[in-house]
């Protein structure tokens, strides 16, 4: 894919709600954004969630997949150039701003500003403090049969009927997916959590004796937890940011690795680079806060350009 010689006002990396919102707002404000995404479709994590998005007050009754379709339609209607299946591998400083390269690009993308909206990925067993107990190589547990990492369509595709299921994690995703397995006929479901952080409305629905709190040992190869064998192990250890490609910028990070930003502008420690949505953990993660983050970055870029910076 050729990036020609155009210098865009902003390169938005990531086609989830935050990135799309930023790109649409910049286009509507009269600027020239371009959006790239490593995936083949716009939508980010919304594409991995087939459930109804009941938390989105502006779109009652819509599923996350429908939200993703709406995001793609908004980009099209705003006339934003979109390059899909186009992972960015490296970003560097340039005289005009920034230059981004990737294997799918015949020439670098050039832009005055960069917006990182690459979101997060689910943490696997080997990326946690339990890694020493798991006994896996760098390929991780996700490659083993019966080990499901993170929420999404791959969980929905499972046949839970009569299966013995272990759920690892103490947050909302762990408890919600445990309830999903129970509701879809699992023979036994047990949650293992070092601490419980989930909403009480979910915790109260788990049958008595269905949760163990404290340290536990996972044998992913044998598919067992504390010596008890399971048909499926579902892993919900939270999220990590997808920002390795931007390491050359030397951005300040939080203790958890998320990109540090100014709350008012979404600007990072590198002038001209902004980070929005879950990659920066700026607000409670959901579609509507991601959309707001996109607007914040777009308005900050507008102010910067109009000030001649």
Image (cartoon, rainbow, N blue to C red):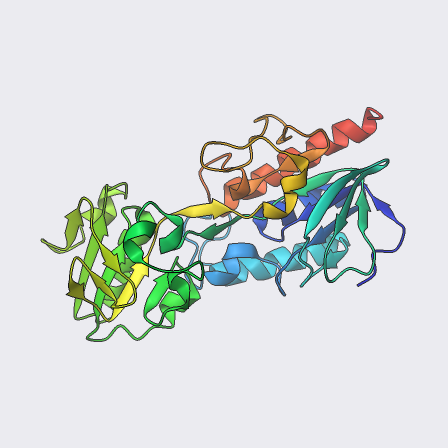
Occupied quadrant, residue 274: top right
Q: Is residue 57 visible?
A: no
x and y percent of residue 292 in the render? 57, 38
Residue found at x 27% / y 43%: 199
Q: Is residue 103 visible?
A: yes
Residue found at x 60% / y 25%: 264
The residue furthest left is 208
Against 194, is 157 above or below?
below
Q: Is residue 107 left or right of residue 150?
A: right
Q: Is residue 239 left or right of residue 166?
A: right
Against 217, is 292 above or below?
above
- Which part of the image, by quadrant, shows the C terminus? top right
x and y percent of residue 74 in the render? 67, 54
x and y percent of residue 251 in the render? 62, 33
Against 281, is 169 above or below?
below
Occupied quadrant, residue 29: top right
Residue nearest the observer in this picture, 198 or 253:
253
Against 134, is 197 above or below?
above
């Amino acid at each position: 894919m050729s990036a020609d010689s155009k210098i865009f006002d902003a390169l938005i990396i990531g086609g989830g709600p935050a990135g799309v919102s930023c790109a649409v707002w910049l286009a509507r404000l009269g600027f020239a954004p371009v959006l790239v995404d490593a995936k083949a479709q716009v939508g980010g994590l919304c594409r991995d969630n087939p459930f109804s998005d009941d938390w989105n007050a502006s779109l009652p009754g819509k599923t996350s997949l429908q939200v993703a379709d709406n995001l793609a339609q908004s980009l099209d209607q705003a006339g934003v150039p979109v390059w899909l299946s186009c992972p960015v591998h490296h970003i560097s400083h340039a005289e005009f701003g920034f230059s981004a390269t990737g294997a799918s690009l015949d020439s670098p993308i050039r832009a005055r500003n960069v917006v990182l909206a690459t979101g997060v990925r689910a943490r696997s067993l080997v990326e946690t403090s339990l890694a020493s107990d798991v006994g896996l190589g760098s390929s991780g547990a996700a490659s083993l049969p019966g080990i499901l990492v993170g929420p999404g369509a791959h969980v929905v595709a499972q046949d839970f009927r009569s299966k013995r299921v272990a759920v690892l994690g103490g947050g909302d995703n762990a408890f919600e997916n445990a309830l999903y397995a129970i509701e879809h006929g699992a023979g036994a479901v047990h949650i293992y959590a070092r601490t419980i952080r989930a909403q009480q409305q979910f915790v109260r629905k788990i049958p008595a004796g269905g949760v163990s709190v404290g340290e536990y040992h996972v044998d992913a190869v044998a598919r067992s937890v504390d010596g008890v064998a399971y048909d499926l192990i579902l892993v919900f250890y939270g999220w990590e940011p997808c920002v390795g490609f931007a390491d050359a910028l030397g951005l300040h990070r939080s203790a958890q690795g998320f990109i540090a930003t100014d709350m008012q502008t979404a600007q990072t420690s590198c002038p001209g680079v902004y980070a929005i949505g879950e990659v920066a953990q700026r607000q409670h993660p959901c579609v509507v806060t991601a959309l707001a983050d996109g607007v914040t970055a777009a308005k900050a870029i507008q102010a910067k350009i109009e000030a001649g910076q």
